[in-house]
Amino acid sequence: MTTPTTPRVALAGIILESNAFAPVATEADFRSRYYLEGQAIVDEGAKTHSVMPLEMTAFIGAMNATGPWEPVPTVLTGCQPAGPVDDGFFGRTAEAIIAALAAAGPVDAVYVANHGAMTAVSDHDPDGTLVRRIREAVGPETTIVATHDLHANISESMVESADVLIGYLTNPHVDMMQRGEEAAFTVRTILAGARPKAAFIRLPLTPASVTLLTREGPYADMIDFGQRRQRELGGAILNVSVFGGFVFGDTPKNGVAVVVTGRDDLAPAQSLALEIAAKGWADRERFRRRLTPLEDAVGLAIKVADDDSLPAVIFSDSGDNPGGGGGGNTTWLLKALVEAGARKVFMGSYVDAALAAEAHERGEGAEFEAVFNRTVETEFAKRFEAPARVLKLIDGSIVGRLGMAAGRAMELGPSAALRIGGDDGITVIVITQRHQTADPMFFEAFGLDIARARTVTVKSRGHFRAGFEPWFPPENVYEVDTAGLTAPVLERFQWKGLPRPVYPLDEDAAWTPPDR
């Protein structure tokens, strides 16, 4: 293949991580975050602080830096993790992408920025459906490169329809820019003549996300091993991606997946994929994690508030992570801390539009009875009320400072900092739009100094670790066992789609390595 003088590269993506137990993701959910068509994609990527996924921004920047090219932007949209996507919205958006490709004429490559763990109401693999339809539209000779979150649930259709799948390497996710750049370099490499060949292995292993950290642990070891072996094999391997998956997708394609792409030969890719998969399976018992009981967490909060010689601590409200489809509105941890008289606590961030609106109506300094979940009460979102004072009000337009959201524009909607329990009591952040608290700006935007808190609690599963590491090293992080749509105790859920038997739910799960 000869590299086109000015390759035409299409840009597309529908980004959603679907939790089977969460409410359906609607068109309004996507449009409230971002829905970009045509030139708006390129324009958004040029902004200093964009709402667009960092991998798309980086892809465009890397293509600009590596030579002439003609972007062919189609549709890029995404929303916060939620339930399955509405069939109608997904169908219309996929059709809009295909129509834009048809109108644009032949392209040399397509870059797809998807999460990889999306489901639809009637399709357990819309990521695969989208890439397959793109392949059918552009033909077998056009290069297709896709980037995915490392929590993607990889299907055969995704692997077969794309030339290369590139997964994040870090959790918390801080390498989206690098993966977007890698995607651009990979497109250039393929257009210059490389012939990618992908090997794919899925294990009967569906761990909770709290075990999929990449600083240390079994998943970190799998990724590190794969990257080391890729370097040892030199130019024979284009990419090694180990996808931990998102168990709450509850689909037949769930399972830790290894995708290794050879440059021109399948055999080295197959061999390396088998090595990585075998290592992961041998380590399967390490994919378990003990959580901190709620009562122990409350006791620790009381203890560190009374003794300044102890290090401050941060709690993950692990059962209610908006970054995994949680509502951001469970109150068990808040209620327990209030009833125990906890002090010097920052809590973020509760999603309660009605409470935020009331705080704005009353104004800063007002004292009132704060009622959480007043308008909507569900199995997990229970009503809770406590006397509170309005400390600070903001409009909710912020820019992330550290970790996965660094430099990215976020809209929280009207938001309030409320104080419960006196001047050194519990400071609670209430927001309108659902976000996980993975960045210090969720507190700093209200003028709060995180270093003054003795306990910080966040509705985030793990991404907060990167955002709050300046104050809380790993040894001062506690994952609290709370109920909710993202509770890491998998035995509490009624699974319908997982490929049983599967570890750790089924101790008798077995894996037979493929015969190469």
Image: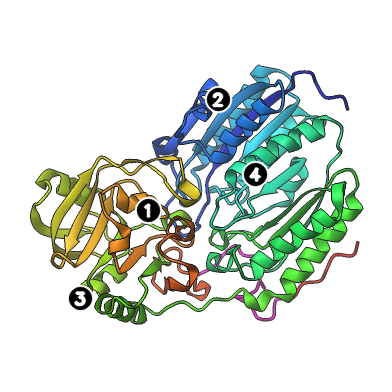
**Disc nearer the start of the sequence (1/2):** 2
Examine the structure image and report whether residue 516 is included in the region drawn in magenta: no
* Magenta span: 493-509
**Disc nearer the start of the sequence (4/1):** 4
Examine the structure image and report whether residue 507 is included in the region drawn in magenta: yes
Taking 394 as reference, is 370 left or right? left
Of helix, strand and loop, which one carries label 3?
Answer: helix
**Disc nearer the start of the sequence (3/4):** 4
Q: Disc 4 versus disc 1: distance between alpha carbons?
A: 24 Å
Q: How crowded is mark 1: few (under 14 residues within 10 Å), some or many (20 or more)?
A: many
Q: How crowded is mark 4: few (under 14 residues within 10 Å), some or many (20 or more)?
A: many
Of helix, strand and loop, which one carries label 4?
Answer: helix
Q: Nearer the viewer, residue 246 or 84?
A: 246
Q: Which mark is residue 179?
A: 4
For label 3, the residue is 339
Of helix, strand and loop, which one carries label 1?
Answer: loop
Q: Nearer the viewer, mark 1 or mark 3?
A: 1
**Disc nearer the start of the sequence (1/3):** 3
Q: Residue 440 carries which label?
A: 1
Q: What residue type is labelled 2?
A: Val
